[in-house]
Image (tube, rainbow, N blue to C red):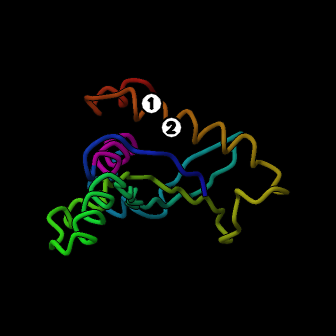
Amino acid sequence: MFIFEDPKSANEFYNYINTKYSLNDFDVWLDVPFVVDGKEFLFSFYEVEIPTKTVNLVPLAIDGVLHSAEIDPVMDTLYETRKGNWYIGIEVYDANDKDCLVEDFEYRKDIIEYLALLKNEYLATHNYNEVLFKR
């Protein structure tokens, strides 16, 4: 899979792909056709949240001291914090459902370059109708 962090709001990549490929909200998540080096490929994408969990040692230490003094913990809700990071995962395959991102696939390098350009365009574009004029 080709994976990158998505700093934008939920469903922004969906809206970008829907607009760029003129899909009219039909099968936007899967089987999106594109051409590299004269060959047609398909991609599907997924939005995935990977949470970052941080342990906060100061509240833990304070409550440890309070516990040794036989006082109930007062900072137990602050022991850890969570923050989610969203990622886009894109899989690419051909008409025979062959994984086109495996190391020995003939067009792998060209496909990765295409996906990197797609990612950069998505991250740099705010009005997705602009991508219709870049074809």
For the image shown, how many numbered marks are present on the structure?
2
- Identified by mark 1, the residue type is Glu
Which secondary structure type mostly characterizes the magenta part of the structure? helix
Instruction: Tell whether 38 sits left or right of 127.
Output: right
Q: In the image, is residue 106 above or below residue 118?
A: below
Residue 78 vs residue 67, the one in the foreground: 67
Occupied quadrant, residue 130: top left
Place of residue 73 in the rendered image (x, y in percent of width and height, measured from the top left): 18, 69
Q: Quadrant of the N terminus?
A: bottom right
Q: In the image, is residue 132 above or below residue 89?
A: above
Q: Are marks 1 and 2 in contact (CB under 8 Å)?
A: yes
Residue 4 vs residue 11, the one in the foreground: 4
Q: Secondary structure at mark 2?
A: helix
For the point 38% across and 58% down, the residue is 55
Q: Secondary structure at mark 1?
A: helix
For residue 118, which numbered disc appears in the image?
A: 2
For the point 46% across and 59% down, the residue is 45
For residue 121, which numbered disc appears in the image?
A: 1
For the point 25% across and 45% down, the residue is 9
| Magenta-colored stretch includes residue 14 | yes
Outermost residue, front direction? Answer: 69
Place of residue 93 in the rendered image (x, y in percent of width and height, measured from the top left): 64, 62
Occupied quadrant, residue 109: top right
Residue 10 vs residue 59, the one in the foreground: 59
Question: Range of the magenta residues?
Answer: 12-21
For the point 76% across and 60% down, the residue is 102
Instruction: Tell whether 112 sits left or right of 59.
Output: right
Per the model, the C-alpha gap separating discs 1 and 2 is: 5 Å
